[in-house]
Image (cartoon, rainbow, N blue to C red):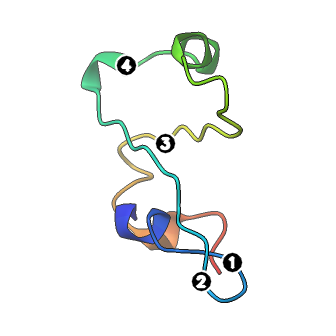
């Protein structure tokens, strides 16, 4: 799935993906509000949270091009 997230996008694949993946077991059990409160990037538009069961396969993605 990480590879899919980093693929260029746009009509002709001309836009670079701006993705930051964090694998931090210390956040296990954190609520979405706790995660969002820790985000320091004021330009951040979207945050996706996924657990260990969601990440292994691209087939688990809710959106696929």
Which is more N-terminal, label 3 or label 2? Answer: 2
Which residue is farthest front? 14
Q: Residue placed at 72% from the left, 85% from the top? A: 11
* Contact check, label 1 and label 2, Cβ < 8 Å: yes
Q: Quadrant of the C terminus?
A: bottom right
Q: Of residues 56 and 36, which is closer to you in this image? A: 36
Within-10-Å neighbours for mark 3: few <14, some 14–19, many 20+? few
Quadrant assignment, res 9: bottom right
Helix, strand, or loop for circle 4? helix
Name the residue carrying label 2: 13
Position of 34 relative to 32 (above/below): above
Identify the residue position indicated by label 1 in the image. 10
Identify the residue position indicated by label 3 in the image. Answer: 50
Q: Secondary structure at mark 1?
A: loop
State the separation of the CA atoms marked 1 and 4: 32 Å
Q: Residues within 10 Å of mark 2 (few under 14, many from 20)?
A: few
Q: Which residue is mark 4?
A: 27
Q: Nearer the viewer, mark 3 or mark 1?
A: 1
């Amino acid at each position: 799935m990480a590879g899919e997230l980093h693929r260029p996008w746009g009509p002709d694949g001309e836009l670079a993906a701006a993705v930051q993946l964090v694998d931090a077991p210390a956040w296990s059990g954190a609520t979405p509000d706790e995660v969002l409160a820790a985000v320091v990037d004021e330009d951040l538009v979207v945050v996706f949270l996924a657990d260990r069961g969601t990440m292994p396969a691209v087939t688990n993605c809710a959106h696929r091009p």
